[in-house]
Image (cartoon, rainbow, N blue to C red):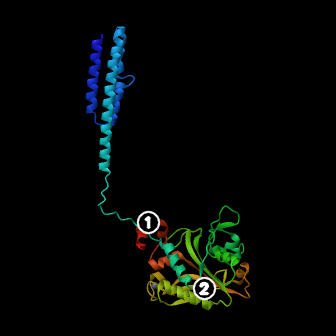
Amino acid sequence: MDFESLSADLRSLQARALKEIAEVSDPASLEALQIQYLGKKGDLTAVLRGIGALPAEDRPRVGAVANEVGEAVKGALAVRGAELHAQVQALRLASEKVDVTLPGRPVGRGTLHPIPETIAAITEVFGQFGFVVYEGPEVEDDLTNFQMLNMPPDHPARDLWDTLYVDIPGHLLRTHTSPGQMRVMQTTRPPIRALLPGRCFRYEAVDASHGFEFFQVEGLMVDEGTSMADLKGLLDEFAHALFGPRKTRFRPGYYPFTEPSVAFDVECVVCGGVGCPACSKSGWMTILGAGMVHPVVLQYGGIDPERYQGFAFGMGVERIANLRHAVPDLRYYLENDLRFLDQFR
Ligand SMILES: [Zn+2]
């Protein structure tokens, strides 16, 4: 080994490296070349191992050539690296180019779910008669949900409501919106005109007309001289607003918290009173329950039943929505299927 042959090796290494660097077409291969030529175990280091065999006076000269070769390879790597980076950038810019002349993509607009939409329609009608919306809690206590509504423990009427209890003693998921009446009476003085929409819960098997969760709207009016005639007049206006002009009637009903209690019927919205399967051939459909507030309930609410009278009514929102939109099965309301919901635009 002498100076001439070692320099020749270095020069040929340089020529080979520059050729390969010029031919490389992606950043990863370029990095591999850098390791191959300049790395600790690279080709340049391998050639320089021969330096120890040279006479001492030749070693600095070979060192100078090796430096030149190293710098040349480094320079070529940097130049090619910059070129490749620019190429990649240009490709990316071309592929991500936005054509600002394309027409915009339509943005799907949402719509109110039929249940809150129906609650809004109900609220609007009663709002015109001065009723104000209140909200009660979904987790109620037994006292407010039952006892103060004239259903002491073991009262047989409790069987009308299959109740879901929660892990707090004496508490349950409200079975109806009626306990909201009590909360309004306890915090407001007459005259009272309150509307209480909300979610209710019952331990029910789910089918087309029953759910374990559903919505009700409760109404309460308390004032001096409030009568059944006021109740009938108000409910007539409500039925006409939602279902158009049609006959209505009261039938006797039963609720522990109203006396007397009634079911409020409208002429069948499907057949107009002739009789059809939807109304069981009766020509009538029951849309809500109502009655005069029981004096015991007024007393629990801190209201003197000798001076004030009240009426209350409660309706299932799903039932009203079914009639407005001819929906046959209330399970649709909970499934969030867009094919169903899109029909209410
Ligand atoms: Zn009918």
Give the labeled residue for mark 1.
Answer: 337
Judging depth in this view, the residue of 295 and 122 nearest the camera is 122
Q: Is residue 20 left or right of residue 309?
A: left
Amino acid at pointer 2: Val
CB of mark 2 near ligand 1 (< 8 Å)? no
> Considering the numbered disc 2 on the image, is that residue within a helix, a strand or a loop?
strand
Q: Is residue 302 left or right of residue 9?
A: right
Quadrant occupied by the C terminus = bottom left
> Badge 1, how many Cα within 10 Å: few under 14, some, many 20+?
few
Label 1: which secondary element: loop
In the image: residue 127, left or right of residue 35: right
User: Residue 308: which disc?
Assistant: none
Q: Is residue 136 left or right of residue 50?
A: right
Mark 1 belongs to which amino acid? Asp
Residue 263 seen by the camera: yes
Please report the residue visible at 51 percent of the width from the left and 73 percent of the height from the top: 116
Q: 28 above or below 107?
A: above
For marks 2 and 1, the one nearer the N-term is: 2
Q: Residues within 10 Å of mark 2 (few under 14, many from 20)?
A: many
Q: Is residue 10 above or below residue 55?
A: below
Q: What mark, if any, has residue 262 been given in the picture? A: 2
Q: Residue at x 28, y 36 (%)?
A: 25
Residue 211 in percent (x, y) is at: 54, 69
Q: Position of residue 152 (x, y in %)?
A: 72, 75
Tell me the CA gap for discs 2 and 1: 36 Å
Q: Residue at x 35, y 21 (%)?
A: 67
Looking at the picture, how far across and down is residue 37, in whole percent?
Answer: 33, 25
**Which of the two residues, 222 or 270, is positioned nearer the viewer here?**
222
Q: Is residue 149 visible in the rendered structure shown here?
A: no
Q: Quadrant of residue 81?
A: top left
